[in-house]
Image (cartoon, helix red, strand yellow):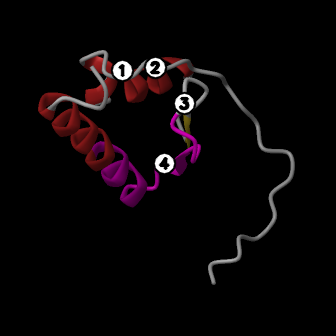
């Protein structure tokens, strides 16, 4: 079977809405995915959390993670350099 099922498509939409809400709440700093669609494709979400436990909760509350449509790994990260993003 190729492609997402209707249920998977709904869950991915819920995943996007979840991240969008967290972005508007200034929790998510950056979210996106690679442009390829083969086995090496992946997404990344960089977000703020007060503790590792809080970060786990953000990750585990994602609808796509809860339903195992996607898998996730948590990697604590510290920004050392940050340039301005060109929004044009």
Residue that numbered label 1 is attached to? 60
**Mark-to-mark CA distance, 3 and 1:** 25 Å
Q: Where is residue 31 drawn, in percent x and y?
A: 52, 48
Which secondary structure, mark 1? helix
Discs 4/3, front: 3
Q: Earlier in the sequence, mark 2 or mark 3?
A: 3
Q: Is residue 71 above or below residue 49?
A: above
Q: Magenta region: which residues?
A: 18-37
Q: Is residue 56 above or below residue 85?
A: above
Q: Nearer the viewer, residue 81 or 66?
A: 66
Q: Mark 4–mark 3 contact, CB under 8 Å?
A: no
Q: Mark 1–mark 2 contact, CB under 8 Å?
A: yes
- The single residue placed furthest to the left in the displayed view is 6
Seen at 31% across and 26% down, the residue is 2
Seen at 21% across and 37% down, the residue is 9
Residue that numbered label 3 is attached to? 38
Seen at 70% across and 76% down, the residue is 86
Q: Mark 2–mark 3 contact, CB under 8 Å?
A: no
Residue that numbered label 4 is attached to? 28
Residue that numbered label 2 is attached to? 56
């Amino acid at each position: 079977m190729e492609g997402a099922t209707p249920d998977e498509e709904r869950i991915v939409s819920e995943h996007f809405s979840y991240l969008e809400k967290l972005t508007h709440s200034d929790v998510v700093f950056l979210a996106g995915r690679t442009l390829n669609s083969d086995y090496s494709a992946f997404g990344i979400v960089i977000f703020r959390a007060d503790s590792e436990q809080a970060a786990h909760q953000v990750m585990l509350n994602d609808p796509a993670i809860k339903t195992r449509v996607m898998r996730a790994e948590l990697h604590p990260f510290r920004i050392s350099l940050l340039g301005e993003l060109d929004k044009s």
